[in-house]
Image (spheres, grey):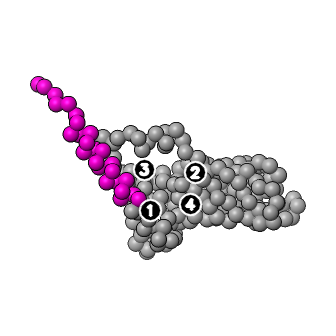
Amino acid sequence: MDLRHPARLLLVVATALHPALAAALDGTFVGALEPDNHGPKIPIVVEMKDLGIMLEGSVKTSGTYKGSGAIVRGENSYGQCTVNVDLSPTLGLRMSGSCDLVSYAGNYILVDKQARARGFGTFNLPRKATEAFKAEPTRAPVTTASCLKANTQCLLGCPRTDEGAEFVCSNRCRTKLNACKERVKKATTTLPETTE
């Protein structure tokens, strides 16, 4: 990994100082692989844990290419994720594309060693929201620090490949931060006074 690039060096340092930043992509992505030859879709579940730059987890497919396995090699480079997995001794899968807190989308190559065939196609896997993740926005944070932490997570999830999308995402994060600070402000002004 080349650490001469200032943004990459900053990300490594920030992840080392604050391990919670590394958990940006932790989650389950569910959907289907769509072959280029218009064959049947292949249902897939990708469970990922983001370790800053490396990804670990597992992949499970069903349908015509049924298999499962741990991620052999996974990498997250500025919102571009590459995952390699052996679904069975004769079936390998490589997925590459953009990844963020909302979805993982891109292209795949499926290698069937037994049939000596390769399959190509695309995928768009939305993130499966857990109950805890769904309930998070309704709970008012206790401190401004928790708002800043949530804002950092939001900004880390913004795409880095398209300037327009990055701008829209960062504006959305700023709006959420301001709303969060307002909730904290209202919560602290409505607290009952204690008598001593």
**Marks 4/3: CA–CA distance:** 18 Å
Q: Element under label 2?
A: strand
Q: Earlier in the sequence, mark 2 or mark 4?
A: 4
Residue type at mark 4 is: Cys
The mark closer to the camera, 4 or 3, is 4
Chain-order first, disc 4 or disc 3:
3
Residue labelled with disc 4: 99
Q: Position of residue 140 (x, y in %)?
A: 35, 41
**Which of these two is toward me, 157 or 81?**
157
Residue 196 left/right relative to 164: left
Measured along the vertical axis of the image, is residue 109 above or below residue 150?
below
Q: Check contact, mark 4 vs mark 3: CB within 8 A.
A: no
Q: Residues within 10 Å of mark 4 (few under 14, many from 20)?
A: many
Q: Earlier in the sequence, mark 1 or mark 4?
A: 4
Tell me the CA gap for discs 3 and 2. 19 Å
Three-letter amino acid code at the position of disc 3: Ala
Please tell me which residue is depicted at 55% across the width and 45% down the height of the picture: 129
Instruction: Looking at the image, tell me whether mark 1 or mark 2 is earlier in sequence order.
Output: 2
Q: Are marks 3 and 2 in contact (CB under 8 Å)?
A: no
* Disc ID at residue 169: 1
Instruction: Write the start and end of the magenta stretch as one range.
Output: 172-196
* Residue 7 in which image quadrant: bottom left
The span from disc 1 to disc 2 (Cα, nearest Å) is 17 Å
Mark 2 or 4: the one toward you: 2
| Pointer 3 local density, CA inside 10 Å: few below 14, some 14–19, many at least 20 | some
